[in-house]
C-alpha cells in the first residue's frame, strides 16, 4: 500500500466514525484487550476493596473503569502507562501495564519519555513486589536469606517491564523501516514513470528522425536519376518529330536511367528492411547520425549488389559517368581532375560521389542551360570536390522539377559526419558553387 493509499484509507476510516483506528481489526483488538483488562482489574478490585476497607462493588467498579483505559492505547499511550503506574500499589492492571509499555515503545514518542516512563514503571513494580513479599513472608513465618526478597523483586520487575519495552522498540523500528521502504518504492515508481515518459519521447523523436533519414536517403539515391529522366523526356518531346534518330537515342537513355533508378531504389529498400528488422531489438536507443546511417546503407547496398553479381556501388570512378549523363541531357559540363587518383575508404568515396551527384541534380533543377565545372582534387590527406555553375540560360526552358529542400542539408550532414568541411552559396557571376573537403583517414 502506498503512502497516498494509506492517507485515503485513513480519511475513509475517519468518515466512517472509527475515531483514531485505521482498520477494523485494530478496533476489534483494542476493544478486546480493553474488555480483558477491565475483567482482570475488576477481579483484582475485590482484593483491593478488602485491603482498602471499601465496599466490594466500589472496588469492582474502580477496576472496570481502570482496565477499560487500555482501549485508548493507540491514541494516548502515555496516559495508559501513567494509569498503570498509578494503580500498581493497588496490585491491579498488570495486563494494562505490559500492553501499555509495548505500545509506548512502538510509538513515535521521543525515546527520553519512553525511558522515563519505563523507569517509573520498574520502580513502582519493584517497590510493590518487595513490600508484598516481605508481608507474605512475615505472615507465613518464612525465614529466608537476605538476598531472596530483592532477587525475586528484581526478577519480577524485569519480567514484567523489559520484554514489552524491548519488543515495542523492535516493532517500532521495523515499522519505521517499512515506512521508509514504502516511501522509497513510491519515489522509485514516480521515477520509473518519468523515465517511461522520457523513453516514449525519445522513441517518438527517433521515429521522426527515421522518417527524415529515409526521405533524405531516397532523395539522394533516386532524385538525380529521375531529374535526368525528366530532362531527357523534355528533350525527347522537342525532337520527336524533327529528328527521330535522336529521339530514339534519348528514349534509350531514359530507359537506362529508369532501370538504374529502380535498381538503386530496390537496393535502398532492401537495406531499410534490414534496418527495420534490427530496430525492434534496440528500441528507445537514439539513432546514429543521418550521414553515418546513409553511408552504412550505401555500403550495405554495394555489398548486396556485389554478392548478386551486379554493378559496384557509387564511388569516385563513377564521377566521369555522372558527368557524361549530364552532358547527354544537354548540359555543358567540364570535369577537371587534379592530383593522382587513388582508392579511398568506401565512406569517403560514396560521400564524394553523392556530393557531386546532388550538385549536378540541383543544376538541372534550378539552373537550366548553365555551364558547369566539376573539380576533383586528390591531395595528400584529403580529397576535395567542387561543382560550380554559371547563371541560368534564359533561352533554355525550365524543366519544372520539384525541390524538397533536403539536398544541401543532406550533403552537409554527410560531409560533417566524416569530419569534413562543406560550403555552398552563390557566386559573384550569378551562379552557384558547392564545395566539400573530406579527410581520407576514415570516419571521425
Image: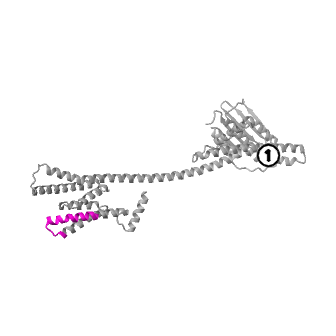
Q: Position of residue 133 (x, y in %)?
A: 14, 55
Res. 314 in view: no
Q: Position of residue 124 (x, y in %)?
A: 19, 57
Q: Which of 231 and 332 is in front in this view?
A: 231
Any magenta on residue 36? Answer: yes
Q: Which of 156 and 375 is in front in this view?
A: 156
Give the residue number, with chain letter if any, for mark 1. 229
Residue 216 vs 55, above or below: the answer is: above
The residue under the point 65% across, 39% down is 421
Q: Give the colouring mode of the picture.
A: one colour
Secondary structure under tag 1 reads helix
Q: Is 32 placed left or right of 337 in the picture?
A: left
Q: Is 143 placed left or right of 403 in the picture?
A: left
Residues shaded magenta: 34-57
* Local crowd size for mark 1, using a 10 Å CA cut-off: few (<14), some (14–19), many (≥20): many
Q: Quadrant of the N terminus?
A: bottom left
| Residue 347 position by quadrant | top right
Q: Is 326 placed left or right of 162 in the picture?
A: right
Q: Is 225 placed left or right of 25 in the picture?
A: right
Res. 212 in view: yes
Q: Which of 320 and 173 is in front in this view?
A: 173
Residue 39 vs 365, above or below: the answer is: below
The residue under the point 71% across, 50% down is 404
- Specify the principal SS of the magenta part: helix
| Residue 390 position by quadrant | top right
Amino acid at each position: 500500500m502506498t503512502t497516498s493509499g494509506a492517507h485515503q484509507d485513513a480519511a475513509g476510516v475517519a468518515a466512517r466514525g472509527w475515531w483514531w483506528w485505521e482498520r477494523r481489526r485494530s478496533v476489534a483488538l483494542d476493544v478486546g484487550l480493553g474488555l480483558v483488562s477491565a475483567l482482570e482489574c475488576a477481579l483484582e478490585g475485590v482484593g483491593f476493596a478488602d485491603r482498602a476497607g471499601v465496599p466490594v462493588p466500589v472496588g469492582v467498579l474502580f477496576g472496570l473503569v481502570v482496565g477499560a483505559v487500555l482501549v485508548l492505547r493507540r491514541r494516548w499511550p502515555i496516559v495508559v502507562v501513567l494509569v498503570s503506574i498509578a494503580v500498581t500499589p493497588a496490585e491491579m492492571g498488570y495486563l494494562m501495564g505490559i500492553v501499555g509499555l509495548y505500545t509506548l515503545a512502538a510509538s513515535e514518542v521521543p525515546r527520553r519519555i519512553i525511558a522515563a516512563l519505563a523507569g517509573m514503571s520498574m520502580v513502582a513494580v519493584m517497590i510493590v513486589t518487595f513490600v508484598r513479599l516481605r508481608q507474605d513472608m512475615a505472615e507465613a513465618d518464612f525465614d529466608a536469606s537476605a538476598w531472596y526478597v530483592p532477587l525475586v523483586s528484581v526478577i519480577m520487575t524485569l519480567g514484567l517491564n523489559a520484554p514489552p519495552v524491548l519488543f515495542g522498540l523492535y516493532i517500532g523500528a521495523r515499522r519505521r523501516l517499512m515506512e521508509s521502504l514504502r516511501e522509497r518504492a513510491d519515489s522509485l515508481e514516480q521515477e520509473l514513470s518519468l523515465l517511461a515518459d522520457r523513453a516514449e519521447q525519445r522513441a517518438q523523436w527517433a521515429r521522426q528522425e527515421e522518417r527524415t533519414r529515409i526521405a533524405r536517403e531516397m532523395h539522394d539515391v533516386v532524385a538525380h536519376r529521375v531529374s535526368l529522366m525528366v530532362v531527357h523526356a523534355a528533350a525527347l518531346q522537342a525532337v520527336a518529330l524533327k529528328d527521330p534518330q535522336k529521339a530514339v537515342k534519348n528514349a534509350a537513355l531514359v530507359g537506362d536511367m529508369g532501370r538504374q533508378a529502380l535498381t538503386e531504389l530496390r537496393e535502398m529498400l532492401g537495406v531499410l528492411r534490414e534496418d527495420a528488422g534490427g530496430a525492434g531489438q534496440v528500441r528507445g536507443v537514439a539513432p546514429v547520425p543521418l550521414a553515418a546511417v546513409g553511408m552504412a546503407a550505401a555500403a550495405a547496398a554495394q555489398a548486396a549488389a556485389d554478392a548478386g553479381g551486379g554493378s559496384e556501388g557509387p564511388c569516385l570512378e563513377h564521377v566521369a559517368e555522372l558527368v557524361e549523363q549530364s552532358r547527354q541531357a544537354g548540359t555543358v559540363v567540364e570535369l577537371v581532375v587534379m592530383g593522382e587518383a587513388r582508392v579511398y575508404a568506401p565512406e569517403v568515396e560514396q560521400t564524394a560521389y553523392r556530393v557531386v551527384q546532388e550538385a549536378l541534380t540541383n543544376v538541372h533543377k534550378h539552373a537550366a542551360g548553365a555551364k558547369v565545372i566539376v573539380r576533383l582534387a586528390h591531395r595528400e590527406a584529403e580529397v576535395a570536390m567542387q561543382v560550380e555553375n554559371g547563371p541560368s540560360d534564359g533561352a533554355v526552358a525550365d524543366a519544372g522539377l520539384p525541390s524538397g529542400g533536403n539536398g544541401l542539408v543532406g550533403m552537409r550532414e554527410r560531409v560533417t559526419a566524416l569530419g569534413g568541411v562543406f560550403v555552398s552559396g552563390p557566386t559573384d557571376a550569378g551562379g552557384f558553387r558547392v564545395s566539400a573537403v573530406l579527410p581520407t583517414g576514415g570516419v571521425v
